[in-house]
Amino acid sequence: MIETARLILRASVAADHAPLHAMWSDPVVMADLGPVKTPEDSTATIARHEGYRQSHGLGFWTVALRDSGTVIGFCGLKPGAENTPIAGEVEVGWMLAAAHWRQGYAREAAAASLGWGWANTDAARIVAITATQNHASRALMERLGMARLGDFAHPNFAIDDPRRETVSYAIGRLA
């Protein structure tokens, strides 16, 4: 578990599934990330991250408000996606319910995840990717001190899907 001034990042529990699915099934939230999820897709996403914890010691956490316990998102570290330029690296990512955007929560959660990564992995750098059109996430990557690495066509999106055009960023371990 990670605690920040306003957030708790923790392993997902059964009670988190409904608010996480509500976020993943929101077309506004998913506009730059991927197709909206079915309840089964949401369950599989949580299970996949639990699997990363078992296999790599990484995985996204449920993000909850410290004062109320309200689940507002999903954030953490995972293995970089296969068949992409970040395969085999440690990737940071985040996603928040739309009602909690523009309040600094994503930056707080992502910075805490980076801190956890530096303390608990030997990664020389941590990477992030997003659709080139996702200006909000790209701006956050830059505010976190990440530098743009380059662009690639993400193989998980159809050729005519604008999310296929993907950009990668990285931040190196401080000496």
Image (cartoon, grey):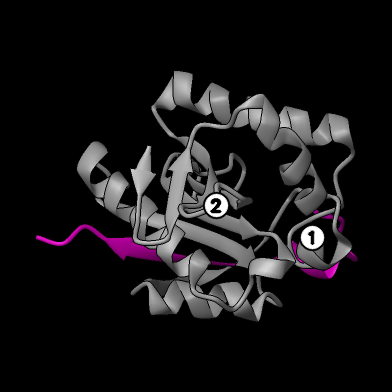
Packing grade of label 1 (10 A; few <14, some 14-19, many >=20) is: some
What secondary structure is marked by label 2?
Answer: loop
The residue at 67%/36% (across/down) is 16
What secondary structure is marked by label 1?
Answer: helix
Q: How many marks?
A: 2
**x%, y% of residue 132?**
66, 74
Q: Amino acid at mark 2?
A: Ser
Q: What is the magenta range?
A: 157-175
Packing grade of label 2 (10 A; few <14, some 14-19, many >=20) is: few
Name the N-terminal-most of marks 1 and 2: 1
Tell me if residue 162 is in the magenta stretch: yes
Q: Is residue 6 left or right of residue 138?
A: left
Mark closer to the observer (1, 2): 2
Q: Amino acid at mark 1?
A: Met
Q: Which residue is mark 1?
A: 30
Q: Which residue is mark 2?
A: 68
Q: Say whether residue 81 is visible.
A: yes
Of residues 112 and 139, the one nearer the viewer is 112
Of residues 146 and 85, the one nearer the viewer is 146
Eyeballing the image, is 65 above or below 137?
Answer: above
Q: Quadrant of residue 94?
A: bottom right
Eyeballing the image, is 134 above or below 91?
Answer: below
